[in-house]
Amino acid sequence: MPILTRCEHCQKLARVADIFAQRQVRCPFCKQIFTARTTEDELPTAVRPQGSTPQLASGVVLPRPADSSQQLTALNGSSSSIPTSCPTCKIALKNGSCSQCGWVPRTNGVSIDAEEQPLICTNPACGTANSRQARYCARCQAMLPSPTGTVLHDRYRVDRLLAIGGFGGVYLAHDVKANRPVAIKDMLAADQAEFATRLNFFRREAEILRLLEHSPIVPKVFDFIEDGQSAHLVMEYIPGKDLLKILESQGHRPFPVDLVITWAKQICDVLTLLHSQQPSIIHRDLKPDNIMLLEDGTNIRLIDFGTARELGKTARSRVAAKTRVYTEGYAPPEQVIGKPELRSDLFALAGTLYQLLTGKAPEGQYTALELRDMLMAPEGKIPPEQRWLYEMIATNLAEDANDRYFSAREFKTDLQRRAVTVSTACPACRHVNKVREPHCTQCAAPLTEPMHGCVTCGKVNRQGSRFCTQCGGRLR
């Protein structure tokens, strides 16, 4: 329920939600900050409520409005452009405020446009609408994103909020020194220990983006700034929409096959560069949401490397359990249990291609089984000229990582050939073996590149080996 209070500066009456009792609020008339008094003793005598109708000093009774619109009109002297529902809870305002989160709209009679929207708490368990001047959520005390018009570090003017998440917001801003639009990723954390943990992830994302600065589909990094309990990553602004939003807006109509193949080859180049680092880096969250389509409708940018991480420097660290970060449907079984590897990214890429080509969200290895049935169907559900592509996708959606391609480079090779490689000749005896066999079945010559050493005995085996050739231990 709202409370009646008087501004200490302009002496005008205003109603605010009761959750702001004894807190500092901004006067809707003079815009000054004052403390919202709640008890009759704290209110000036002239405005103490008597019964249900508080009276003014002149003896004029301030009528109790029948609904929120009338109440705001009584305070504003205007009824134009009055909001009738909470912007976050989407429920009708009662008595001038939201009964769910306590949000109170501006009360100066001016309409609320997109740039004047309240700050929505990033805590997924909260979601409260807050004043644009607040830095911490009034309900859960989580840090809030920066409001429009804020100038960060005396250089970057926030124009609007592009996206919001549990870790912070992404803004469109203007670099006043370089005179260019930029995207700023803001990391929010009220707790100091949590901030230190998140800061490590944030720094790593900046380092990965700098590592990929020569890739044409990765946004450029301009600046990384740490300032007390906040950090900002300043990047190239990418105008456009992510592929998932585009799919949804066009009724899940698939993208052209040739265009999807072009995108896939570009993504393979980025994955190859990540996986070839020492130690290797895995993306862990490749999906249509993280691929932006530019306004030209052809070129893409791969965004959000916040979940990327190093795989590990030693054989034991590579197979050790890691933080379980994944998106259901795009993540293979080994990633779900916290043990991702390089081929986990190939699984995610295959699921992404499946969705872009069919308009349907992938369901992990179950999609691979569905594709196998479609490929074997006599009625030919898949066009003959596209069978190779769906065979590739099914192969890389395999439940066992050893049944997938070895690398993003191999993935790209078959995309360029527009055919699935099924066999390879032994360089020693020319015997034809199945593709990805670690050793020739005739002369035992190695056919694939070396992989990391066995965790048990340290023996270096060949890619595709399921068991160590020295101790017989299971390999990953």
Image (cartoon, rainbow, N blue to C red):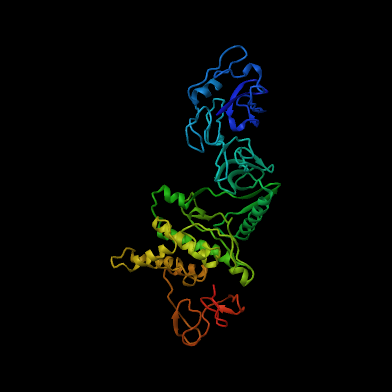
Dividing the picture into quadrants, the one containing residue 32 is: top right
Q: Farthest residue in the left direction?
A: 379
Q: Nearer the viewer, residue 413 or 17?
A: 17
Residue at position x 55%, y 41% in the image? 127
Q: Where does residue 45 sit, x and y in percent of width and height?
A: 65, 17
Query: Is residue 291 visible in this depiction of the protein?
Result: no
Q: Where does residue 201 sit, x and y in percent of width and height?
A: 63, 56
Query: Is residue 361 visible in this depiction of the protein?
Result: yes
* 20 w.r.t. 381: above or below: above
Q: Farthest residue in the front direction?
A: 51
Q: Where does residue 325 sit, x and y in percent of width and height?
A: 55, 58
Q: Nearer the viewer, residue 433 or 332?
A: 332
For the N terminus, the image quarter is top right
* 301 w.r.t. 446: above or below: above
Q: Where does residue 92 sit, x and y in percent of width and height?
A: 47, 32
* 83 w.r.t. 184: above or below: above
Q: How many marks?
A: 0
For the C terminus, the image quarter is bottom right
Q: Nearer the viewer, residue 45 or 265?
A: 45
Q: Nearer the viewer, residue 264 or 462?
A: 462
Dividing the picture into quadrants, the one containing residue 366 is: bottom left
Q: Farthest residue in the top direction?
A: 59
Residue at position x 53%, y 78% in the image? 467
